[in-house]
Amino acid sequence: MKIFRSHILIGIDSISQMQKIRDIEKILKAEIKKNGLEEEIKVIESGTLGVFGFGVTMLVYPEGVYYANLDETKIKRIVEEHLLNGRIVEEYKIEPPEAKKDLTIKGKQERIVLNNVGLIDPRNINDYIARDGYKALEKALFEMKPQEVIEEIKKSNLRGRGGAGFPTGLKLSFTAPIEGEKFIVCNADEGEPGTFKDRLIMEGDPHKLIEAMILSGYAVGARKGYIYIRGEYKLSIEIMQNAIKQAKQYGLLGDNILESDFSYDIEIKKGAGAYVCGEETALIESVEGKRGNPRIKPPFPGVKGLWGKPTVVNNVETLSNIPSIIVNGADWYKQFGMEKSTGTKVYTILGHVNYPGLVEVPMGTTLREIIFTYGGGIKGDKEFKVALVGGAAGAFLGKDMLDVPMDFDHLGEYKAVLGSGAVLVMDEDVDILDILENLMEFFNHESCGQCSPCRIGNPTILRLIRKIKTNDNLKGNEWETIEEIAEAMKETSLCALGQSPILPISSALKYFGKELGR
């Protein structure tokens, strides 16, 4: 095996592709060859490096140096100064908070879901295998019975990372005893504004998701899985299709996996861009080729789902925890996070922070740590005003919530939600009424219109907010009316879309009632 002096990681994701990272990669390789360094320096394509807003970036090992906003001129100088002569080009360097050497253990990321992202080539199955990939599958098939897999997941206390926080092992246990054909469905639709974690997991470590789906299928007795990927996620679809093809070539998908008695296959279904298809029953309708409208529950998908068959639906992040739990055991997993919210959570940090990006930290990490340790604090040294946590369907968290542990139970005590893990940070200059109008425009646009509370309620709330904004013939009770409508929608809407506006509206009024003219 050839040993290289340095490795340069190029993070290929949808964002970096738009910034023409492929052109920069070609220039870098040409300069390395021109300077006679091709036998010493290896350029590796990986998944996201987790840092955004700095143009094209790359990471040089073993120094751990991030270079940002790269162009042809900067690449030539980095090759000449750093790679050829060993002098780091300080003015091109950025230092994301998680890369700093002086952080305490508490301030460092704990990576379970993202432990391979940015370190392996997602298009090369051998890279995944070299980092114990498919070891969990081998252990499950030859050392564990299906029920033992479920019990290990139940014991880990893994809860769904899509927002609801339902126990994953319990969900599997509902479907396992039912006889007949069953399905595993991965919800990779990810339509929540500000949320892009599942996309970057698929683009950076696709085989982990495949392994997790096979394990889930083995646990409940399913022989087929579907990954429902948002249609706009073209790179995710391409990488997942390649990974499925490789897994089949290696005997890890298809008939008699690893020469066992278990057979399993995976198929990708492309979403059509409807936010409501993030709801599991609407997603199932879409997979079946129908319009993505939510179903009335019960029956729940675990009993009657895809084509009327028992179906387990989980999102990408939830599933991606399973291989590590099976390999290392539930007790290992429970050492991360909180007692009732174990493990880690992947957050997408965006808005008015110095370092927007992707981080994975233990459950229970505070909002203050997420914003000021991992996000690097507020841009321009401005004051923190509020954070919208969980996407459009989330809640506003003010200054008094900065030190509350971010997990399902603690946030629930304050009528807030962890949601999808999006953290939109806003500074002192933000107009909350503008944000609310934007959120309601989104809900109004994305409503499928199937049920009356959502179909009528969303445009009514939007109209009232615009009336408040323009100060147009106000009666003085507009906010009370808005809250009443949102509360009625919460109680009577068919799915989470119609049930969601109450959270951002009530939390905005809690912190900014005076500013909003309440």
Image (cartoon, rainbow, N blue to C red):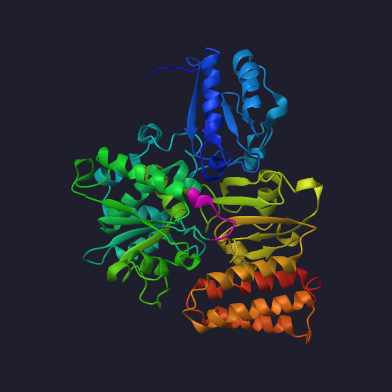
Quarter of the image for residue 248 reads: top left
Seen in the image, is 270 located left or right of residue 165? Answer: left
Compared to residue 91, the image places residue 260 above or below, namely: below
Name the image quarter holding the N terminus: top left
x and y, in percent, of residue 304 in the image: 31, 71
Compared to residue 147, the image places residue 80 above or below, namely: above
Seen in the image, is 363 located left or right of residue 434? Answer: left
Q: Nearer the viewer, residue 126 or 362?
A: 126
Q: Which residues are magenta?
A: 192-199
Compared to residue 108, the image places residue 395 above or below, namely: below
x and y, in percent, of residue 242 in the image: 35, 42
Name the image quarter holding the C terminus: bottom right
Q: Nearer the viewer, residue 439 or 400?
A: 439
Q: Nearer the viewer, residue 153 or 91?
A: 91
Query: Residue 462: within the magenta?
Result: no
The residue drawn where x is 44% and y is 42% is 205
x and y, in percent, of residue 190 in the image: 49, 58
